[in-house]
Image (cartoon, rainbow, N blue to C red):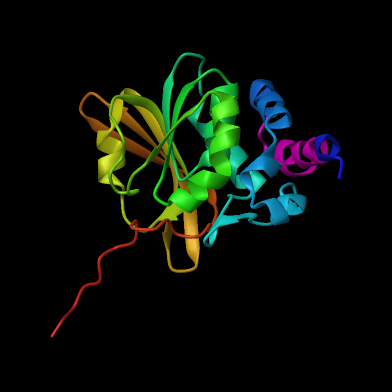
Amino acid sequence: MDFAAARTMMVDSQVRVNDVTDRALQAAMLAVPRERFCAPDRAFSAYAEVECEIADGRVLMLPREAAKLLSAVEARPGETALAIGAPYAGAVLARLGAKVTAQEANQAVLDVVAPALADAGAETVVAPFDQPHGEGYDIIISEGAVGVRPQAWLDALAVGGRLAVVERTGAAGRGVLYLRGRDGFSRRDLFDAAPPMLTGMTPEPVFSF
């Protein structure tokens, strides 16, 4: 399979047409080998409009949705970024010049994506998704959905930092952007999306009697 040609088709048919006009981001997506973030036997589906499996049921976010989240954070060279359950997005951010830490909760997933992340210059760590590694980040991004406001992630942002994630309840979800100010957080809706939920990022069940 000609993966370079497939990347061009992906950017032309799934990214540019969905109002992602940042040329540096488009170039980064053309350069990052998305197929290396899929299970080896699923690499052929890396550029299709499907959620490509990584391992143990974890999947990559659709290219369109990942591109829109990446566009929203407006990454700048030299910024620090935490990619939580977002290995592909993390590699794209590294290509854009960010200093990236990629956090995974499952070693089996990290085993698949670690070589490509290392080649991209990103650091990797294994920790539960609800416990972000480090603090003071300019950018936090996730390719999975969360069912509750990820306050621990927000607290890991520096002032001026941005968090891009999908908040999902039931079948529906919305990509959102948070911005940390000196006196709190602002939130902006971005687009409809419903990627799978990240492990440990669903609301605790509430029992009533």
The residue shown at (33%, 58%) is 200
Report which quarter residue 170 is drawn in: bottom left
Q: Position of residue 128 (x, y in %)?
A: 32, 49
Query: Is 70 left, or right, of 181 in this rendering?
Result: right
The residue shown at (35%, 48%) is 129
Question: Does the magenta segment cover residue 36?
Answer: no
Query: Is 130 left, or right, of 84 in this rendering?
Result: left
Residue at the left extreme of this rendering: 209
Residue at the bottom extreme of this rendering: 209
Q: Position of residue 154 (x, y in %)?
A: 29, 37
Q: Nearer the viewer, residue 93 or 165?
A: 93
Most frequent secondary structure within the magenta stretch = helix
Whether residue 77 can be seen here? yes
Q: Position of residue 55 (x, y in %)?
A: 55, 56
The residue shown at (82%, 34%) is 4
How many labels were placed on the picture? 0
The residue shown at (28%, 44%) is 131
Question: Does the magenta segment cover residue 7?
Answer: yes
**Quadrant holding the C terminus:** bottom left
Query: Is 99 left, or right, of 50 in this rendering?
Result: left
**Quadrant holding the N terminus:** top right
Residue range (magenta): 6-21
Q: Nearer the viewer, residue 200 or 208?
A: 200
Q: Position of residue 101 (x, y in %)?
A: 42, 30
Q: Nearer the viewer, residue 152 or 187?
A: 152
Whether residue 49 can be seen here? no
